[in-house]
Image (tube, rainbow, N blue to C red):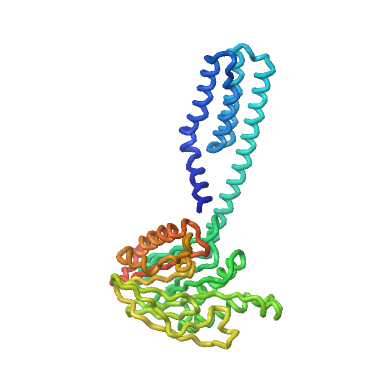
């Protein structure tokens, strides 16, 4: 987070704020020239001109740094001419040293600009990958208002092992998935993409939640093991904790299947109620290995005005510097009346403040509020 903030500040300096900051090195050049020329012969302030390009490289580009360096060299030459010492070895050595320092500052700036361009390209690719894999949740689905939040643990990362997705069914209901893939890095991202793809391909057409859970487990297990030997399959454990939900439009309930994932929370007024399933199944990827071919569905009330919170363990296991867990169940009721988007903004700020902007694990949260009615469909063009 600190690196990202620093880069954002750097980008905000150029080009909008750089002209204002140029007052510092330019004022230094003018001040050194005036004071040096008016000072007694035995006082020489010309070496201080080296600070001008050194300051400029911190906020300006290579061309601006080169221009300030050239002005500093010109100022040193002017000082030598006005004081009548331009031909001495001392002033020539100062000019040569100033030229070298200015050239080094320009070279450093060129390298930094190239690295920042590469970082911007990497960031743009990561953002594109996130938009493709972890698509934004629909703001409205039937009578539901939905918002999603994803906070990566690694700086400059945009996607990790946490995931969420939503799908609209032909039976006038909304299905949602939230999960946490084991591990980190490219392997976790690959398994995340696999699970999201399997969900999107099947969620809208699977007749029941249990069939969908069986499909996800089989697809995940088959893809992660198809190129592995039996020995590798015995030692490598790829799995994902997950919760599958189905929320009908015209029935104030929520149906869910829990696969080793933290239980959702219902915020009703100032009350908070965990939806603890009586039967929590094995994580996705383990079901078929243990002969599980059916999943129990739990049903809980989800009334108009209720707010449903889905989350990953990166939220509840976030620790501060003293090792205290983030008090998620204590803080969440503070924002019961907020819209889902506003609630997640408050939650993000509060969570990052608790961990001092450094998460040890990715964190994802989905907020869902049931409204009184389904919004009318948009008017069709005649």
- Whether residue 373 is visible, yes or no, is no
Q: Is residue 268 left or right of residue 318?
A: left
Q: Percent from the top left, x then y, of residue 365?
A: 44, 67
Q: Is residue 127 above or below residue 18?
A: below
> In the image, what residue occupies the spot 68% across and 15% down?
88
> In the image, what residue occupies the spot 46% across and 33% down?
20
Closest to the observer, 220 or 206: 220
Residue 87's quadrant in the figure? Answer: top right
Q: Percent from the top left, x then y, of residue 154?
A: 55, 59
Q: Is residue 312 above or below residue 152?
A: below
Please, which residue is most extreme toward the top here? 84
Q: Percent from the top left, x then y, of residue 157?
A: 55, 58
Q: Is residue 284 left or right of residue 167?
A: right
Q: Is residue 51 left or right of residue 99?
A: left
> In the image, what residue occupies the spot 47% across and 56% down?
357
Q: Split into 4 quadrants, where in the image is the C terminus? A: bottom left
Count of numbered badges drawn on the protein:
0
Q: Percent from the top left, x then y, of residue 254?
A: 38, 79
Q: Is residue 135 above or below residue 216?
A: above
> In the image, what residue occupies the spot 51% across and 68% down?
162
């Amino acid at each position: 987070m600190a690196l990202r903030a620093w880069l954002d500040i750097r980008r905000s300096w150029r080009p909008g704020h750089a002209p204002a900051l140029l007052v510092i090195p330019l004022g230094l050049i003018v001040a050194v020239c005036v004071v040096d020329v008016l000072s007694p012969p035995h006082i020489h302030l010309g070496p201080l001109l080296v600070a001008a390009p050194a300051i400029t490289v911190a906020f300006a580009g290579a061309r601006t740094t080169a221009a300030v360096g050239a002005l500093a060299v010109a100022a040193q030459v002017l000082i030598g001419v006005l004081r009548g010492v331009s031909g001495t070895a001392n002033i020539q050595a100062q000019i040569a040293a100033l030229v070298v320092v200015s050239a080094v500052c320009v070279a450093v700036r060129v390298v930094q600009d190239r690295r920042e361009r590469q970082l911007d390209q990497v960031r743009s690719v990561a953002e594109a990958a996130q938009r493709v894999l972890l698509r934004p949740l629909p703001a409205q689905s039937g009578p539901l208002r939905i918002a999603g939040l994803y906070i990566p643990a690694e700086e400059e990362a945009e996607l990790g092992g946490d995931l969420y997705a939503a799908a609209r069914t032909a039976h006038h209901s909304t299905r949602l998935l939230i999960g946490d893939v084991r591990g980190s890095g490219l392997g976790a991202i690959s398994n995340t993409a696999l699970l999201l793809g399997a969900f999107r391909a099947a969620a809208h057409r699977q007749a029941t939640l249990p069939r969908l859970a069986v499909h996800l487990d089989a697809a995940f297990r088959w893809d992660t093991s198809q190129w592995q030997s039996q020995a590798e399959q015995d030692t490598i454990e790829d799995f994902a904790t997950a919760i599958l939900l189905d929320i009908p439009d015209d029935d104030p309930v929520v149906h869910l299947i829990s696969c080793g994932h933290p239980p959702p929370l219902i915020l009703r007024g100032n009350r908070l109620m965990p939806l603890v399933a009586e039967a929590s199944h094995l994580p996705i990827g383990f079901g078929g290995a243990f002969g599980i071919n059916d999943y129990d569905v739990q049903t809980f009330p989800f009334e108009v005005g209720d707010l449903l919170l889905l989350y990953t363990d990166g939220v509840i296991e976030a620790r501060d510097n003293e090792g205290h867990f983030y008090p998620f169940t204590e803080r969440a009721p503070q924002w019961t009346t907020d819209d889902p988007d506003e609630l997640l903004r408050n939650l993000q700020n509060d969570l990052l403040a608790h961990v001092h902007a450094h998460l040890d694990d990715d964190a994802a949260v989905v907020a869902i509020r049931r409204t009184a009615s389904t919004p009318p469909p948009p008017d069709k063009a005649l």
